Every structure is written in C-alpha cells, then in structure tokens.
Image (cartoon, rainbow, N blue to C red):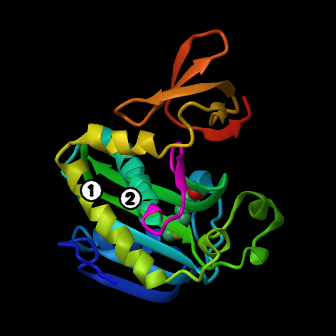
Amino acid sequence: KKGLTTEYIGKKIYSFNEVESTNSVAKFLAKQGSPEGTVIISETQTKGKGRRGKKWESPSGGIWLSIILKPDIDPSKAPLITLATGVAVARTLRGMNIDARIKWPNDILINNKKVCGILTEANAKFNTVEYVIVGVGIDTNLNVDVLTEDVKKRATSLSVEAKIEISESETVSNFLNEFEEIYDLFKLEQFDEILYDWRKMSQTIGSYVEIKQPLGKVLKGTAVGINNQGALILELNNGELKKVISGECTLKEN
Ligand code: BTN
C-alpha cells in the first residue's frame, strides 16, 4: 500500500530469477564499490547459505534477499546488526497481524516454527568494517511439501500460518522500511532501544533452553537475558550465570 519509503535502503535493487546465493552476489558487489543500502533479491537460489555452513533451501515462494551495509563501527558491534534485522522482520510480520517471535540469535518463529532465517557476513580490515552483508530468507508462500522431511518438521511459511496469500513485494517494502528505521538507530548506537524491542518480541527470554555449542558442548538452563553485545545470558541449573556467544538454541519445556 504505502510502498518503499526509505532514504537509502533499497535505493538500488538488483533482482534476479536465479543466483547461487544473494549473499555471494552482495559480497561481490560490495567489493566492487556498491553503496550502502544496495539490495540483491532473487526468486530462487541454487546454493542458498544457512548458518554454520548449512544449505538453505530456496525454491520460489520465498523472499531471498541481501542488503549491503557499510557501517562505520567497531567489528565487535556487527552481531547486533543480526539482532536488529530480527527485530525488523518481526515488526514487519506483526504489522501483518502475525504473531512473530524471535528465537536467539536470529530465527523468526510463528507458532514455534521457523519462517525466517538471517545470515550476517562481515568483512573486517585493520579493525574497521569494510562491509556487512545481511541475508534474510522468509518463507512466504512456499509450499512446505517441497522441503526435506527434516526441514519440514521445524519450518513453516507465512501463507500457511496466516492462511492468506502473502504479497511478496509488499512484504519486501515493509521490511526494508522497518530495516532502515532500526539500522538508523544502530548507527546512532542506540543499542538499548534495539535490544528493548528484541527482548519484547523474544521467545527465548524466560524459557528453559538447551544450547549446543560449536565444539559439541551442551548447556542447559533458563535464558534470563541478553547483553548489549547480543550474547545470551543463561542461568544454569546450579544457579550460575553464563554468557553464551554462539550456539544452536532449542527451546525446552520447563
Ligand atoms: C539460517 O541458517 O537460519 C540463515 C538463513 C539465511 C538465508 C538467507 S536467503 C538470502 C541470503 N542468501 C543466502 O545464501 N542466505 C541468506
């Protein structure tokens, strides 16, 4: 309805029918000098990338896009861009009357099933950030039957949950509008505001969770908070507080 109202996010949009990965195209364009705010979007991806080297299934019926960012920040702040992006997606879906929640660090869930994943790739040079690519995948009108059994158990799509056909172009515009608003806050270092919204829409905080860490260690406890670097604060069964920077989070029944 109101379309794209941004100042610089999506000023230039490259759209494709098929690419290997919009993140890879974005990286290439960023290196070639494409400015901040450039968006790459594709109908399908043949080598869609998920986190931790996983493949991201990207048939048509989803929004697969990447945004080139060139923030003048300390590289340690980059993870917050992922959280900010999660807030932008959740706000977009809530604007469509869909009860979206954020699972740490960066999945968007509806009724406990994943509808969106975010993959941020940053390139730092001499302790400055050269560029950050934010990749967002949203299952909009995806026929979930085409997904592998394993993914189907955990994934859903907007059309399945909202029981209506979703306008992809409208969803993209709404998301880019939300994204610019929150990214502006990020650049102004208003991290508290971003984290406040993140916590409000979080499914993780207050839940009993299990975190599988990169080296296979498993932590269990109650997620009690998130610090201003985006790390999860876990209260272990013995009462000890532990800061968790990365890992695969599963929500458990209490
Ligand atoms: C995750 O594992 O949850 C992250 C998935 C990120 C997928 C998106 S789709 C657009 C962009 N291009 C990619 O290759 N990956 C991201």
Is residue 157 among the parts visible in the rendering? yes
Which numbered mark, 1 or 2, is in the foreground of this view?
2
| Amino acid of disc 1 | Tyr
**Quadrant containing the C terminus in the rendered view:** top right
Q: Estimate the x, y position of residue 243 in percent, counting from the top left.
A: 49, 24
| Amino acid of disc 2 | Ala
Q: In the drawing, does residue 50 fall left or right of residue 79?
A: right
Q: Which residue is mark 1?
A: 183
Q: Which mark is residue 217?
A: none
Marks 1/2 in contact by CB < 8 Å: the verdict is yes
**Quadrant containing the N terminus in the rendered view:** bottom left
First in sequence: mark 1 or mark 2? 2
- Which secondary structure is most common in the magenta stretch? loop
Q: Estimate the x, y position of residue 24 in percent, counting from the top left.
A: 45, 70
List the single residue furthest toward the bottom. Answer: 17
Mark 1 nearby-residue class (10 Å; few <14, some 14–19, many ≥20): many
Q: Residue at x 50, y 43 (%)?
A: 202
Q: CA distance from mark 1 to mark 2?
A: 9 Å
Would residue 105 be counted in the magenta stretch?
Answer: yes
Q: Which residues are magenta?
A: 94-106
Q: Which residue is mark 2?
A: 88
Would residue 188 be counted in the magenta stretch?
Answer: no
